[in-house]
Image (cartoon, grey):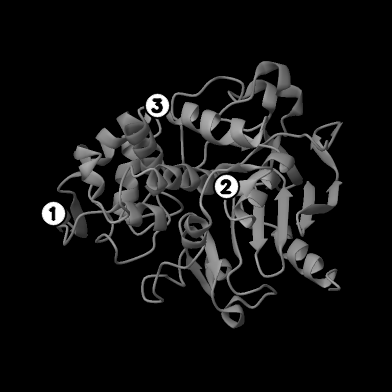
Amino acid sequence: MITMVARHGKVVHFEKYGLMDVGKPMQFNTIFRLASMTKPVTSVAVMMLYEEGGFQLDDPVADYIPELRDMKVYSSIDQDGIHIVDAIRPMTIRDLLTHTSGLSGVGADTPVDSMYREANLSDGTLQDMIQKLSKIPLLYQPGTRWNYSRSTDVLGYLVEVISGKPFDLFLKERVFNSLKMNYTGFYVPQEKIEQVAAVYAPDSNGIKVIMKPEISNISTPVKFLSGNGGLVSTANDYMIFSQMLLNKGEYNGVRLLRSKTVDLMTSNQLSNEIMPEDDFFGPLMSGMGFGFGFAVLQDSTKFNNIGSQGSYWWSGSGNTYFYIDPKEDLILILMTQFVPNFYYPVFKELRVLSYQSIVD
């Protein structure tokens, strides 16, 4: 793994540990699969278009993606099959940004999720996914419940519709090149394959490699440009992205977002009634609200761990993790490739040790 800490705009800790693959020591420029840490990047891209007048947050998604007009909502299932009802109101872009769209598809096991799996949503392009989603009911009424979902994949397609560019090209031109995030993208060029970490998982003998870089498809340009979880990156690159957020949208003289937009994105947008305490994240979401792509610490008593109110974070399924505390001017990055997520949540220890090291 790699741990990285920055405070007051300076990296104060950057260490590597163990192996990135069998017989290969971890390197500072090792490339990791970000998985769900892709979501904040997608949210930034969407809000850049928002600032340019591309849409309003409470616009119906169907105004831009007509296939998602008149979505039905799952009601129940019995011996006669699945029962559906009309949506009370349309899904909005705000709903997509806050995972209250009614979509499902990440970490759940419901009749709707079974339909997602049967549809094989990631087989094809983002537009293909939209066509498939349009035929499947929502799991919840839009705006009524936070549910970790395919919402951010739909946001990736929204970027394509509004910008007129493929999602990967928009991110490269407007985000990665601007911030000089030179190792971030949807695939790894063949000449950099030696920098890619293998993915590990537990087994009866300890751990095992489940994905070797040289025999995976990570060096092949992808067809499905997942805003949910498709990016790869390095600790350095994600620190640049995180510092841009902590700086309220600016890094090294380059501004991606206005200060007020970042404030909006990183503020809780949801009521306690909408934010569940019993989803598959379990205690990690206790005391949390949600902004536009980030969990936001609301109640440190419920959270039962150290942290400042208003801190925001997210993680990836390979145990990648970032955490930003504006009050302490602090950024934490953890990069590793060990699944399942939360099997050994070392990021909790990183956070505690980092706070304990602050002396002023």
Residue furthest top as drawn: 191
Q: Which residue is mark 2?
A: 37
Crowding near the residue tagged with mark 3, few <14, some 14–19, many ≥20 C-alpha atoms within 10 Å: few
The answer to whether residue 281 is left or right of residue 318 is left
Measured in 3D between alpha carbons, the distance from the residue under mark 1 to the one under mark 2, in whole angstroms, is 40 Å
Residue 8, horizontal then vertical, whole percent? 77, 59
The answer to whether residue 9 is left or right of residue 238 is right
**2 or 3: tag closer to the N-terminus:** 2
**1 or 2: tag closer to the N-terminus:** 2
**1 or 3: tag closer to the N-terminus:** 1
Measured in 3D between alpha carbons, the distance from the residue under mark 1 to the one under mark 3, in whole angstroms, is 44 Å
The answer to which image quadrant residue 25 occupies is top right
Which secondary structure lies at badge 2?
helix
- Tell me the number on the disc at residue 63: none
Going 39% across and 28% down the picture, which residue do you hit? 123
Going 67% across and 17% down the picture, which residue do you hit? 190
Which secondary structure lies at badge 3?
loop
Numbered circles on residues, count: 3
Disc 2 residue type (three-letter): Met
| Disc nearest the viewer among 1 and 2 | 2
Disc 1 residue type (three-letter): Asp
State which quarter of the image contains the C terminus.
Answer: bottom right
| Disc nearest the viewer among 1 and 3 | 3
Crowding near the residue tagged with mark 2, few <14, some 14–19, many ≥20 C-alpha atoms within 10 Å: many
Going 71% across and 34% down the picture, which residue do you hit? 31
Q: Which residue is mark 1?
A: 80
The answer to which image quadrant residue 46 occupies is top left
275 relative to 218, above or below: below
Q: Which residue is mark 3?
A: 165
